[in-house]
C-alpha cells in the first residue's frame, strides 16, 4: 500500500484512520473466505480472497484490497469481531 494514499484514505463511514493489516491476519481472513465462512458487513458471503487489508482505527472492520485497489465501500467491509 502506497504510504501517501494511506495517509489520505479514511473509513467512509466514521472517517477514522486506517492501517495496513499484517500478513497473519490476511492469511486468517483468506482461510475463512476459502472455507465459505466469512460474510461482509452487507451480509454477503465473501468469495474473493484479499491481497491486503486496511483496518479501521477502532479495529472493528477491515476494508479489502484487491489488485492494489482498496475497496472502500461500507457494505464490503469485513467484520473483525
Image (cartoon, helix red, strand yellow):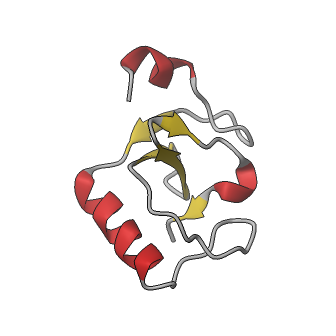
Q: Nearer the viewer, residue 44 or 78?
A: 44
For image coordinates 38% across by 50% down, the residue present is 51
- Side of 1 relative to 38 (left or right): left
For image coordinates 28% across by 50% down, the residue present is 22
Q: Single out the residue that lies furthest toward the left.
A: 24
- Side of 63 relative to 1 (left or right): right
Q: Single out the residue that lies furthest toward the top.
A: 4
Where residue 46 sits in the image (x, y, percent)?
A: 58, 70
- Side of 5 relative to 41 (left or right): left
For image coordinates 55% across by 58% down, the residue present is 60
Decide: is 34 above or below 11.
Answer: below
Where residue 17 sits in the image (x, y, percent)?
A: 54, 32
The part of the image, by quadrant, that contains residue 77 is bottom right
For image coordinates 63% across by 76% down, the residue present is 45
Decide: is 26 above or below 66.
Answer: below
Decide: is 67 above or below 45.
Answer: above
Where residue 20 sits in the image (x, y, percent)?
A: 38, 40
- Side of 20 relative to 77 (left or right): left
Where residue 7 sits in the image (x, y, percent)?
A: 48, 19
Location of the N terminus by quadrant is top left
Decide: is 62 above or below 65.
Answer: below
The part of the image, by quadrant, that contains residue 4 is top left
Numbered circles on residues, count? 0
Amino acid at each position: 500500500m502506497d504510504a501517501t494514499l494511506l495517509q489520505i484514505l479514511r473509513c467512509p463511514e466514521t472517517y477514522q484512520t486506517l492501517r495496513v493489516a499484517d500478513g497473519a491476519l490476511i492469511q486468517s481472513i483468506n482461510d475463512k473466505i476459502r472455507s465459505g465462512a466469512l460474510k461482509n458487513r452487507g451480509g454477503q458471503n465473501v468469495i474473493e480472497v484479499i491481497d491486503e487489508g486496511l483496518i479501521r482505527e477502532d479495529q472493528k472492520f477491515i476494508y479489502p484490497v484487491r489488485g492494489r485497489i482498496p475497496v472502500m465501500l461500507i457494505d464490503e467491509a469485513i467484520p473483525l469481531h
